[in-house]
């Protein structure tokens, strides 16, 4: 179990100071879920701008997920080419890709979604791999960093604006944001509302993924902390509920990849097919 393993590794069992630490330091949960440096690289100063290329634990998880994706999909593609019918890992990955195509992207975006499939495949599986890696003992959750989820949301935002303008023209795209038949005196308010709507969509994507991936770990740490706050008599209840939340985290990891991809497809589809 990720949280319990990390907790035991850091604090030796039977440590008499553990209860005092838990009671006195109200920030111990945040300490465990916060990012930690792995490789420190001297920052690069360009004028008044500082570029920090240091690798933290969460960034490392993103790199591991990216390498794992390349390896697994390369192996699956190679395996499928050698066989008449996909089997094993190749069959499973093909099934997942068909699921993303037919049950997430096409229903959300509609016609013309085929050329966007590489983007949505990458988005779904990258988030999924990062989320699942976080469940391995000793690992960290890359998507529990608001910087990571904001970066993913900004990618969707720029894809939305780019293809909206590409398909409808610059003027046509922003003109299409305003519903037809709006009275002139309401137009200034509608422009402000629609402009804010463009900004709140990526904001909602970033916060939803960040909050859901962070909340589960906080709950598990809080349940484990009850053992040292209320006594060892609550161990069966605390561990039982922690295991339940941990299993639920597996569902959340898949669900958040599904939701992020679905909403991204929906937002891009709305920008491209404004007539619908």
Image (cartoon, rainbow, N blue to C red):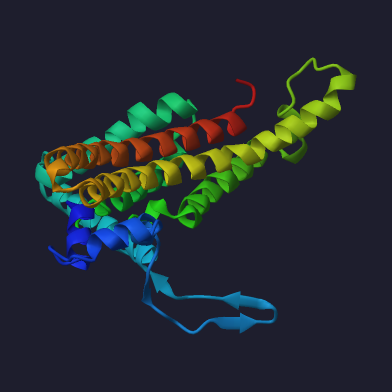
Q: Residue at x 34, y 47 (%)?
A: 218
Nearer the observer, 230 or 205: 230
**Residue 276, position as x, y percentages in the image:** 60, 20
Q: Does 231 sit above or below residue 137?
A: above
Q: Quadrant of residue 230?
A: top left
**Front one among 73 and 37:** 37
Residue 231, position as x, y percentages in the image: 18, 48
Residue in the image at 22% along x and 35% along y: 95
Up-down relation of residue 56 to residue 33 (above or below): below
Q: Farthest residue toward the right?
A: 185
Drawn side of residue 9 relative to residue 268, left or right: left
Report if residue 210 is visible in the image.
yes
Residue 104 relative to residue 270: left or right: left
Q: Quadrant of residue 8?
A: bottom left
Q: Residue at x 43, y 33 (%)?
A: 262
Specify whether residue 140 is in view: no
x then y, percent, for residue 130: 32, 53
Depth check: give the residue in front, 144 or 149.
Answer: 144
Up the image or down, 180 lies above or below 99; here it is above
Q: Residue 25 location in percent, x, y?
A: 38, 60
Residue ID at (62%, 38%): 200
Residue 34: image quadrant is: bottom left
Tell which of 157 and 176 is nearer to you: 157
Q: Is residue 164 above or below residue 62?
A: above
């Amino acid at each position: 179990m990720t949280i319990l393993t990390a907790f035991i590794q850091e604090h030796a069992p039977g440590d008499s100071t553990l209860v005092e630490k838990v009671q006195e330091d109200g920030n111990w949960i945040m300490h465990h879920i916060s990012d930690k440096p792995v490789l420190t690289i001297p920052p690069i100063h360009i004028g008044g701008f500082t570029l920090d290329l240091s690798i933290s634990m969460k960034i490392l998880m993103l790199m591991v997920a990216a390498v794992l994706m390349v390896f697994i999909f390369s192996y699956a593609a190679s395996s499928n080419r050698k066989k008449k019918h996909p089997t094993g890992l190749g069959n499973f990955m093909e099934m997942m890709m068909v699921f993303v195509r037919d049950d997430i992207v096409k229903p959300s975006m509609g016609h013309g979604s085929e050329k966007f499939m590489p983007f949505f495949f990458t988005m779904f599986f990258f988030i999924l791999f990062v989320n699942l890696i976080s469940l391995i003992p000793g690992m960290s959750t890359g998507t529990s960093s608001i910087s990571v989820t904001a970066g993913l949301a900004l990618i969707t935002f720029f894809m939305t604006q780019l293809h909206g303008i590409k398909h409808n023209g610059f003027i046509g795209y922003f003109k299409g944001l305003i519903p037809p038949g709006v009275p002139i005196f309401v137009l200034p308010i509608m422009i402000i509302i629609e402009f804010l709507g463009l900004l709140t969509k990526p904001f909602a994507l970033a916060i939803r993924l960040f909050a859901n991936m962070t909340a589960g770990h906080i709950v598990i740490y809080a349940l484990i902390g009850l053992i040292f706050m209320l006594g060892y008599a609550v161990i069966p209840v605390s561990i039982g509920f922690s295991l339940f939340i941990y299993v639920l985290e597996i569902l959340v990891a898949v669900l958040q990849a599904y939701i992020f991809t679905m909403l991204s497809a929906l937002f891009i589809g709305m920008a491209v097919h404004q007539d619908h």
